[in-house]
Image (cartoon, coloured by chain):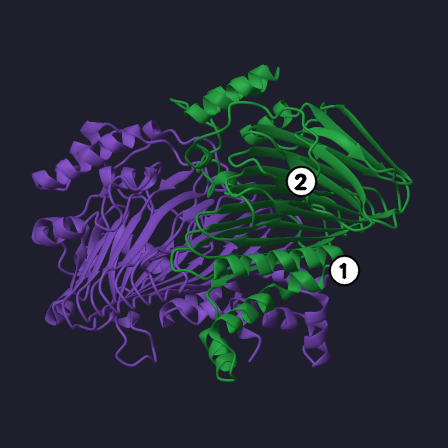
Chain colours: A purple, B green
Amino acid sequence: MAAVKETIDQVKEIDVDKYKYGFKTDIEMDMAPKGLNEDIVRFISAKKDEPEWMLEWRLEAFRRWQQMELPTWARVDYPEIDFQDLYYYAAPKSTPGPKSLDEVDPELLATYEKLGIPLSEQAVLAGVEGARVAVDAVFDSVSVVTTFKKELAKAGVIFCSISEAVKEHPELVKKYLGSVVPTSDNFYATLNAAVFSDGSFVYIPKGVRCPMELSTYFRINEEKTGQFERTLIIAEEGSYVSYLEGCTAPMRDENQLHAAVVELVALDDAEIKYSTVQNWYPGDKDGKGGIYNFVTKRGDCRGKNSKISWTQVETGSAITWKYPSCILRGDNSVGEFYSIAISNGHQQVDSGTKMIHLGKNTSSRIISKGISAGYSQNTYRGQVSAHAKATGARNFTQCDSLLIGDKCGAHTVPYIESRNSSAVFEHEATTSKISDDQMFYCQQRGLNEEEAVALIVNGFVRDVLQHLPMEFMAESQKLIGISLEGSVG
Amino acid sequence: MEQQVVKLTDAENQLADLLKAAGANDASNALSAHGLPHRRIEEYHYTDLRTLLRDVPSDLAQANDRLPDVQFEGYGRIVIVNGKLVHADEIGGVEIKSADAAAKSVGNDQIINLMDGLAQNQIEITINTSLDKPIHIAHVHDGPDSVVADKVRVTTAEGVHATIVETFEGANARGLRFANFALDVAADAEMLHVQLDQNAEGARQFVQNTYDLHENANLRTLASHANFKLGRTDIKADFKGEGAHADFAGLTLLMDQQHGDFTLNVNHGVPNTTSTETFKSIVRDRAKAIFQGKIIVAPDAQKTDAQMMSQGLLLSERAEVLVKPELEIFADDVLCAHGATCGELDEDALFYLMSRGIKRAEAESMLIRAFLAELFDEMENEQVRDKLGDRVDAWLAAAE
């Protein structure tokens, strides 16, 4: 059917052939030797000039990691990773402490330009008055440029690289690092704890509404470097922050490992909104290459009335293993998860969320939309649980899958655990393709086939799209297929 | 993969010995190597038998001929006591015989091994013509505490219509029962299969029902979980012919510290098949109701329509409902959905009824009956419906 073909083409837009971010930058790299042992951990720590306690923390994680086994429960299939055949540290050589963009390697800037990162003032979105996006741009492992720092400092917001935070705010890092995702949490999180290269650190003081949306762009560069980001966001009492994370990576042959950890802490009445657009290299049309993405993301609603909201658009990576979760510890806290996961080619996505209700009157909402095409496998795996003391817990879950083509798979694996009677959980899941009835209904009202498909797919993901911040919504719509959004009113 | 266990529990050792005594050496060795299924085995995620099944009787049940208490008026009756066929009515068009237990059950876990290894006989039933009166298979477990394993194999001729009602009863206070039932629904045949449990309070029971559905076959099943301390029913259905349809239903009524687990695997292996799954649980006190349902749609099984629903009603603070409704879909032109809800009785509805002069207890029982109504409405067999109704009445009375 032509209409379906149209949709396939649109999904293909994001596919490998047209992977427009597939270019490579040649910059001299400062590398650690291949492999992983205690010396490498020490090397990384020394390279970053870390205090003794940080090194100890890493080493403890590394020792635990050696005892751990690779998790196999996810529905993803990949050749065994040789963890000794990877580089665990790579940093671009740059002039020390660039104060302005002029001092930065022009090739690096050109890379950003190709990515379309709004680094400077011009990046402020036209027409959005007063909107500013601060970029803590990560080029491979080390934060090179941080903008808008001064303005943020005026508000008392700390937004810096995690290595900087270790040096300048050790009391905060000591208090919160590993408090949401413990070092021994899981295989990849423990690996990350041992060798994390860099990442962002955000601290919003009491009662402050962060004056702009914070944003980090990750980029994987040098061949065979695993990238191990570590992000820590702390929102003090009554504060608010919206954080944007977007990813693109150059095209290459070797599979690349990425094992990030993101920890969010929301104290009383605080709100954190975390949005991700992930568009890493998914591998070529035969499934060769592509990023292996094993991410541990978890938010802790530690204070009463706190709120954490995850929104993600997952279109890239050969393997995605990612479950942004919320621990609803504080009374009346709220957790949200909105996700669009698109898989094409030979991509494998195993993603979902966990909502752990511990406090009283906590509520959570999960909206997950999976679109699978080509030979891909797309799994939603989620858990909603109410502890015996979590009276009045409330959850609504909706996970819908759309299948395009008969070689792909869509799977749903929810765990629903109600351990107290006043918890009310509702869960619904559907799997379907675009039905002839839907097509007929739209066409009978005067839409042509193409418009009808656009309308239906648009409607399918809309619930999630509308939760993205402005800047990301544009990028996501582009990813999903401009014409899908654009052709209909 | 199952991992080797370091130290076996007494119960595991005892069961391994029982298997050995029954001549099932491979099964015995496998049990010694892996132990009973535990929470890391995904199918037993919520039913960790290494902790739940700690004491088991040391002997297999001895021959006995106690007749069952449960009666169905006008049914053709087959009585199996302590694993042996002791009585079978003459039923026109039906062949019934007892043979050595040779059939291998579906699956590969230690409970299946126990079912196969401990069963001495298998009761083979062949239904050649459509039946006016339903068949009642009464499983009785009697005598001092013991372990029993029943095995029933049913095959049907093409196009027949028949009803099979199974009852599990036993006075065996701490008994352990394994029951394995396989039904092959031939092309164009229409079958109803009902399982009612009527065990003693302390009984533990593990049931496996496997169904094969051929072209245009039609199957309706209903199983109950109410009378046991620990119970697990493992349902496996395999669609082998196009145009087949099946409805699976389960009723769970638990209280005190009862633990009931329905685990369902429905495999839509061919195109144009449909199924519905409806499982309802009501729990109070510290009881646990578990439902794990998986619908699999094979790569070429286009036009599958599967709708799964599980609903839990929690009447006490400490009761638990644990649900895992899975979809595993490899074809695109399908309609699959699952829904799951759990919660307590709606205060507004209670208030509405009470404001009209109905006492709280009565209002609660009305709402509970309404919650279960769907299961009753779809059951055309009157005697089964009455028996289920009695079951609900008894449960509500006991809870007061």
Q: Are marks 2 and 1 on the same chain?
A: yes
Horizontally, residue B139 falls left or right of residue B344, namely right
- The residue under the point 12% across, 54% down is A172
Res. B380 mark: 1
Q: Position of residue B283 (x, y in %)?
A: 48, 56
- The residue under the point 23% across, 67% down is A304
**Residue A34 appearing in the image:** no
- Write down the chain letter for disc 2: B
Amino acid identity at mark 1: Glu
Looking at the rendering, which quadrant does residue A130 occupy?
bottom left
Q: Position of residue A118 (x, y in %)?
A: 30, 65
**Residue B143 appearing in the image:** yes
Classify mark 2: residues with Cα within 10 Å, few (<14), some (14-19) or many (20+). Answer: many
Looking at the rendering, which quadrant does residue B394 occupy?
bottom right
Horizontally, residue B320 falls left or right of residue B306, namely left
Res. A96 mark: none
Closest to the observer, B332 or A474: B332
Which residue is label 2 attached to?
B209
- The vertical placement of A104 against B82, above or below, is below
Q: Position of residue B227 (x, y in %)?
A: 56, 47
Horizontally, residue B297 falls left or right of residue A333, namely right
